[in-house]
Image: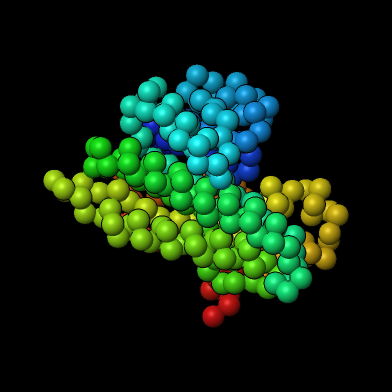
Amino acid sequence: MYDFLGKVCLVTGGTAGIGETVSERLIRAGAEVIVFGRDEEKGAALADRLGEHCRFIACDVGDPAQVEQAFATIRSVYGKLDCAFNNAGVTARYGALADSCPEDWMKVMNINVNGTYHCMRHELQLMLTRGIGAIVNTSSCAGVVPIGGQVAYVASKQAINGMTQVASIENARLEEGGCIRVNAVAPGPILGGMNSEARLKAAPENTQRKINVTSMKRFGTADEVANAVLWLLSEQAAYVTGVIMPIDGGYASGKF
């Protein structure tokens, strides 16, 4: 359906869940895929499974020196970057702001906000050399409609929304008609990762609560998010930029 033949694509947080699914789908569509992740064992296993068109680079996106080194590798090996999916992110322990832990706040903001910033900065620099590209960031339904008990996570995703829209404005019309499109997806409750089968079984009341907040009364899947990500990265979305796209089973619309 989508043609990424000859495209060089970066996926951060790409060794599991949505990131892994997007990496697989991009390779099936013909792309050369670079995956950033902190878990070298998972990364090596992913690259081995996906084959010669996948390169894993161990990188903590919250560390600007590691990001600098990783992008130096991209420049030397590929010489360009066509698409990027900034998906690396973490959450914190549930609890009210008054009872929250500053260490949790710093961890979430460093990975989710600083990490997205560091990567976007280098991505845009690479894309600007050719005047074309597409970036998709991972926001969250919590970045569209805030939820209690997750102050760091909500704040981080709202910051990502802001970065997405600022970058979309700055790069929508470049010299000689070029354009770098910048969008975000805002997933609701998605199976896998933070909603792994083990976690859902261990907390049935919390599982039911997550289901109930969606209009469709079910969890989404990584493939359903990947559908939106690939569309936004593709030429089929050539007139789309600055969008924060809910992929949430009606979670956000049900709050208004």
Residue at point 64%, 71% (across, down): 147
Occupied quadrant, residue 57: top right
Q: Quadrant of the N terminus?
A: top left
**Foreground of the two, 226 or 178:** 178
Q: Is residue 21 visible?
A: no
Whether residue 204 sits left or right of residue 71 in the image: it is: right
Residue at point 54%, 27% (across, down): 56
Residue at point 62%, 24% (across, down): 44
Measuring from the top left, give residue 140's x and y in whole percent: 56, 60
**In the image, residue 256 above or below residue 95:** below
Q: Quadrant of the C terminus?
A: bottom right
Occupied quadrant, residue 235: top left
Measuring from the top left, give residue 184's x and y in whole percent: 45, 56
Measuring from the top left, give residue 107's x and y in whole percent: 65, 53
Measuring from the top left, give residue 125's x and y in whole percent: 32, 41
Whether residue 15 sits left or right of residue 227 in the image: it is: right
Residue at point 69%, 62% (across, down): 102
Q: Is residue 18 visible?
A: yes
**Foreground of the two, 180 or 106:** 106
**In the image, residue 174 above or below residue 153:** above
The count of marks equals: 0
**Can you name the residue that lies furthest to the right here?**
202
